[in-house]
Image (cartoon, rainbow, N blue to C red):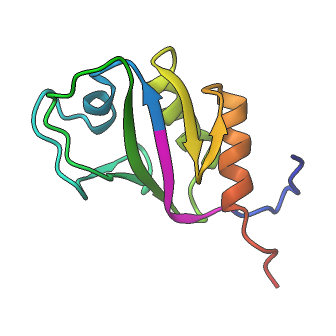
Amino acid sequence: MVHRNDARFAFDKMKIEIITSDKDLKYHLFGAYYRWLKFGEKFKIPDSQASIIIDEDHAGLSIGFRESVRLYITFGVNENIDEITRWLFDKIEGRATYLLIEGKKINPTFSEMLTAIKRVSLLPPAV
């Protein structure tokens, strides 16, 4: 996907589902070490105004080989989408099996994540 230099991106509550077998990933994402994560809990992405919001309660008691971490990411037009994607990628690298970004299955590579996030958050040209 090719974007013009003046392309603008923003999204309010982009749904991302991370499929993983790493039971600690959700706590790593939200900076909450082994405590109950509550639906709607918000975490600010460092060095930005962007944030993630957890989409369900997590008590850390789930059993099984695969788990889904559902969250929403919100960012405005003044945010650096590459840096936000890099932050998310660094958190899940080697820990995620795949992602669903707005329902589309994505491999957990930086380039595929960036392309998918840009695709769904591209705003119409400013007039």
Please provide the residue range marked out in magenta.
Answer: 9-17
Could you tell me if residue 69 is visible in this image?
yes
The structure residue drawn at horizontal position 20% and vertical position 47%, both measured from the top left corner, is 57
Examine the rendered structure and indicate whether residue 74 appears above or below residue 48.
below
Side of 64 relative to 117 (left or right) = left
Residue at the extreme left of the image, as rendered: 35
Q: Position of residue 21 (x, y in %)?
A: 39, 18
Query: In front: 101, or 126?
Result: 101
Residue at the extreme bottom of the image, as rendered: 127
Quadrant in the rendering for residue 33: top left
Inspect the magenta stretch and tell me whether residue 64 lies in it.
no
Examine the rendered structure and indicate whether residue 67 appears above or below residue 114.
above
Q: Position of residue 93 (x, y in %)?
A: 51, 20
Quadrant in the rendering for residue 122: bottom right
The structure residue drawn at horizontal position 23% and vertical position 54%, both measured from the top left corner, is 41
Could you tell me if residue 45 is visible in this image?
no
Query: In front: 92, or 83?
Result: 92
Examine the rendered structure and indicate whether residue 59 appears above or below residue 43.
above
Side of 95 relative to 1 (left or right) = left
The structure residue drawn at horizontal position 60% and vertical position 26%, both measured from the top left corner, is 108
Quadrant in the rendering for residue 119: bottom right
The structure residue drawn at horizontal position 66% and vertical position 60%, both measured from the top left corner, is 121
Inspect the magenta stretch and tell me whether residue 13 lies in it.
yes
Q: Position of residue 85 (x, y in %)?
A: 57, 39
Side of 47 relative to 29 (left or right) = right
Q: Quadrant of the C terminus?
A: bottom right
Q: Position of residue 34 (x, y in %)?
A: 13, 27
